[in-house]
Image (cartoon, rainbow, N blue to C red):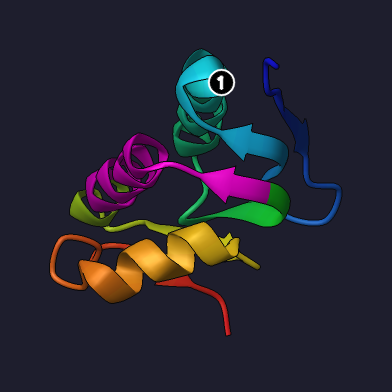
Amino acid sequence: MTTTLTALPLPDRPGARLSGSGDLDTRQALSAAIGVVTGLPDPVVHLDLSAVAFLDMAAVAALVEASATLSGQGRRLLLHDPPYSLRKVVEMFPDECAALEVAA
């Protein structure tokens, strides 16, 4: 069964709401969504992950890389409502995931 990942712009702030799963089948869609969000000129961009069921290690790594890149530009990528899979990876690899910023 092929999984899907969709991204829609957030209506109230710069960023996107992702829905679906981030895995091998959706790698290109995730990369495209991250590219659009990180390309926004705002100092803080948002990713609403409340409708994401699962993110594999590569998806988490892509988010870490995007977050680190923005941080190097003096900007922030703020993650909202991450799925359990992302929280578990952060718990297991805190140093490697240090660039991730999750909204309270």
Using the image as rendered, state which of residue 42 and residue 10 is in the foreground.
10
Find the magenta span and give its range: 53-69
Using the image as rendered, state which of residue 31 and residue 53 is in the foreground.
53
Residue 89 vertical placement versus 68 (above, below):
below
Tell me, yes or no, whether the highlighted magenta stretch contains residue 66. yes
Residue 8 vertical placement versus 79 (above, below):
above
Q: Which residue is mark 1?
A: 26
Which residue is drawn at the image coordinates 56% and 66% (left, top)? Answer: 84
Using the image as rendered, state which of residue 54 and residue 69 is in the foreground.
54
Mostly what secondary structure, the magenta segment? helix
Residue 71 vertical placement versus 33 (above, below):
below
Give the quadrant of the C terminus: bottom right
Tell whether 78 sits left or right of 88.
right
Q: SS of the residue at dot 1?
A: helix
Tell whether 22 sits left or right of 7.
left
Q: Residues within 10 Å of mark 1 (few under 14, many from 20)?
A: some
Q: Residue furthest front?
A: 1
Tell whether 77 sits left or right of 83.
left
Which residue is drawn at the image coordinates 25% and 70% (left, top)? Answer: 92
Give how far across and how far down residue 98 sits, in percent.
Answer: 22, 69
Report which quarter residue 56 is drawn in. Answer: top left
Give how far across and how far down residue 49 sits, in percent.
Answer: 66, 54
